[in-house]
Amino acid sequence: MRVLHAVTLHSPTHAFGGPVRVALNLAKGLRARGHEAALLALGEGFDPMPAEVEGVPARLYPARRLLPLGFSGMTSPALLAQAGRLVRDADLVHVHLARDLVTLPVALAALRHGKPLVLQTHGMVDPSEKLLAKVLDAVAVRRVLRGAGAVFYLTPHERTGLDAVLGAPLGTAVRLVNGTPAQEERPELSGPPRILYAARLQARKRPVDFVDAAAEVLRTHPEAQFTVAGPDEGELPAVERRIAELGLTGRISVPGSLSSENVLKELRRSHVYVLPSVDEPFPMSVLEALSVGVPSVVTHSNGLAKDIAAAGAGRAVEPGPAGVAAAVLELLDERENQAASAAARKLAAGSFSMDAVLDTLLDRYAGILSSR
């Protein structure tokens, strides 16, 4: 089976975050099971554009920013012109859908050419009062939602939002959690405690809360080391300013964006992973931390919060630095950390393994293809 995975943007800085990670994990898993899977996306920051990404064949088109709307304002005339040919070469088109000028045109091209289409929205298609969102919903989003053979969602909240966007119950909705490949276990750690944040530096992710929590943790563990890693999406000046205000320059490292390989290296030497974001659907960075065996601290509005709390794989807290700091301090206790680390590995391998995700995915693919 030839499957084309379309996602908005791939870059060396991993600026588009989780959807690209999910698309690559699924494509690699499909290829391991004998299928042909490829990636289609805009590319930015490459010279030349790579022909494959992490072993997955890729068609990356140079990104052009037509409108000052972040990812939504990016596209490629060449990609748009060739979308029809690209989808015709696939047996099934899997679009990681956002309200943008890449994934929407590819999904529409699949419908136009009669190709089986599945959508995965990653929480990116939610009810919005913005004028552009309303226009896109009217001319394209509802059309592709109705035309898809399956629409994968992560949480009940996301499913409710999709129904609201469509204006009716979405009959093809299927829950598909994010999965993470098995990873080498974190080795036994020595030296000072290391606490990691590795996500985009944007307001919803609350990286400044991480900095404020670090100041509190350092009162108890003055030798602790902190890292704030990730591409800047507007919060880097605030992070650097807060570090300076608290006198933590040299105590908190801000290395910028890390490759996937280097994120895993950082995780393997970290005692605790922290993602203080709010309304986070299903973060891949937390799944990767769990797979390595790093106890994680998240807020209650994180889609993984209940699983982490129930398994004892970390802590779920109220938003804000006080709760984050208290949770980190608990998890820096050696016995607590070891227990949470083992629980994290078990949770990732049991509930969020790639094998389980791929079984669900392939079953749905087969159902769609057989019904045509």
Image: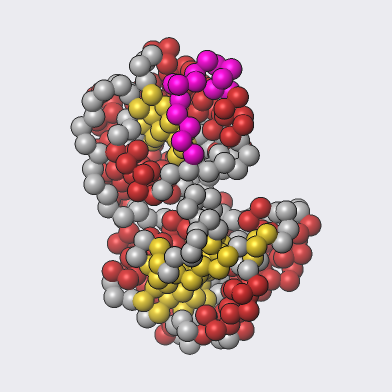
Q: Residue furthest front?
A: 47
Out of 40 and 330, give the one closest to the viewer: 40
The reply to whether residue 56 is in sight is yes
Query: Where, by quadrant of the figure, is residue 135 drawn?
Result: bottom right
Q: Residue at x 23, y 25 (%)?
A: 190
Q: Residue furthest top?
A: 219
Say whether residue 282 is left or right of residue 354. Answer: right
Q: Is residue 90 above or below residue 348?
A: below
x 43%, y 58%: residue: 22
Q: In the rendered view, does 119 fall on the left or right side of 65?
A: left
> As displayed, is residue 368 above or below residue 71?
below
Q: Give the residues drawn in magenta, as a range.
A: 242-256
Q: Residue at x 48, y 65 (%)?
A: 49
Q: Position of residue 8 (x, y in %)?
A: 56, 62
How many numbered marks are there? 0
Q: Is residue 360 at least partly visible in the picture?
A: no
Task: Pick whichever, 296 or 162, lies toward us.
Answer: 296
Which residue lies most toward the right here?
Answer: 131
Residue 307 among those drawn in magenta: no
The quarter holding residue 185 reads top left
In the rendered image, the quadrant that contains the N terminus is bottom left
Residue 317 lies, with reference to residue 163, above or below; the image says above
The colour scheme applied to this rendered structure is secondary structure
- Residue 65 at x, y = what percent? 68, 59
The residue drawn where x is 63% and y is 39% is 234
Residue 244 falls within the magenta-colored stretch: yes
Q: Quarter of the image holding residue 336?
A: top left
User: Who is closer to the viewer here, 162 or 116?
Assistant: 116
Image location of residue 280, percent across then percent down: 53, 44
| Residue 140 horizontal/vertical position (percent) | 69, 71
